[in-house]
Image: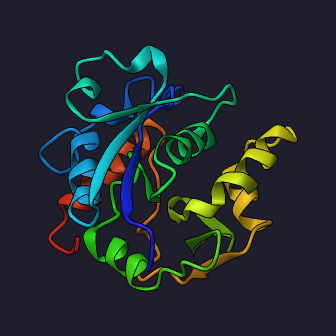
């Protein structure tokens, strides 16, 4: 029997290039954090938002269940590892909150093709073919290897998946995991999503 699947929305980034909180941007009629949380919650038993300790009280994030970073490493791997440590019984569907083109079909395809025997299941990037860690499933037995990976001084979740027994999948839609990091990209994404041709 596979482990229960919990959802983790990564919302702990500093949004340095955007110069405003990416979690608060609106592409779909609500803050992107809430939209992503709703998307994940539709396919997971429980869902949480990953935050840094200094973000836990902000008005956007404190309305949702949180997992506060509990490891000293920085970046998204801190949130993933903290989730694995907090609920060791669960597998985690991890989704970054700056992916406005991801949709329920993308998540359901990932779940349908989940390989519980591997460390995780991830899509291959449409840009370089490497595993995409910010829309991926991490199984409970990823915890020990990830702790060792971080203890060795590494902090890149993509490298972790690349060097682990990861089941990788082709993306159903090439743009599904395109992220948005600048004001210009935000404007372009909003225009693309408002197009009558947007799916």
Between 154 and 106, the one lying in front of the other is 154
Q: Is residue 176 above or below residue 90?
A: below
The quarter in which the C terminus is drawn is: bottom left
Residue 93 in the figure: left or right of residue 100: right
Residue pictured at 14% horizontal, 71% vertical: 196
- In screen coordinates, is 6 left or right of 53? left
Q: Quadrant of residue 65?
A: top left
| Residue beneath the point at 40% across and 49% down | 8
Q: Position of residue 13 (x, y in %)?
A: 50, 31
Which of the two residues, 32 or 37, is positioned nearer the viewer here?
37
Res. 79 visible in picture? yes
Q: Position of residue 103 (x, y in %)?
A: 29, 67
Residue at image position (24%, 56%) is 41
Q: Quadrant of residue 104?
A: bottom left
Quarter of the figure that contains the N terminus: bottom left
Near-viewer residue (32 or 52)? 52
- Residue 75 vertical position relative to residue 140 in the rendered view, above or below: above
Relative to 176, residue 46 above or below: above
Badge count: 0
Whole-percent x, y for residue 130 in the image: 69, 70
Residue 30, image quadrant: top left
Left/right of residue 97 with respect to residue 139 in the rendered view: left
Residue located at (30% from left, 49% from top): 47
Specify the color scheme: rainbow
State the image coordinates of residue 71 (x, y, percent, origin top left).
63, 29
Q: Could one spot residue 125 in this view of the protein?
A: no
């Amino acid at each position: 029997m596979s482990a229960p699947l919990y959802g983790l929305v990564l919302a702990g980034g500093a949004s340095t290039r955007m110069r405003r909180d990416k979690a608060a941007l609106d592409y779909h009629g609500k803050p992107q954090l809430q939209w992503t949380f709703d998307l994940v919650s539709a396919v997971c038993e429980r869902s949480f938002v990953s935050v840094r300790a200094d973000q836990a009280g902000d008005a956007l994030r404190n309305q949702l269940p949180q997992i506060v970073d509990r490891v000293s490493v920085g970046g998204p791997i801190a949130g993933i590892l903290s989730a694995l440590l907090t609920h060791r019984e669960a597998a985690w569907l991890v989704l970054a909150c700056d992916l406005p083109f991801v949709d329920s079909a993308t998540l359901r395809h990932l779940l349908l093709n989940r390989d519980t025997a591997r460390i995780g299941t991830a899509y291959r990037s449409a840009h370089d073919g490497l595993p995409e860690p910010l829309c991926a499933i991490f199984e409970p037995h990823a915890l020990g290897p990830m702790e060792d990976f971080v203890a060795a001084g590494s902090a890149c979740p993509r490298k972790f998946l690349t060097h682990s027994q990861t089941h990788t999948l082709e993306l159903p839609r090439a743009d599904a995991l395109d992220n948005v990091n600048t004001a210009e990209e935000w404007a372009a994404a909003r225009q693309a999503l408002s197009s009558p041709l947007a799916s």
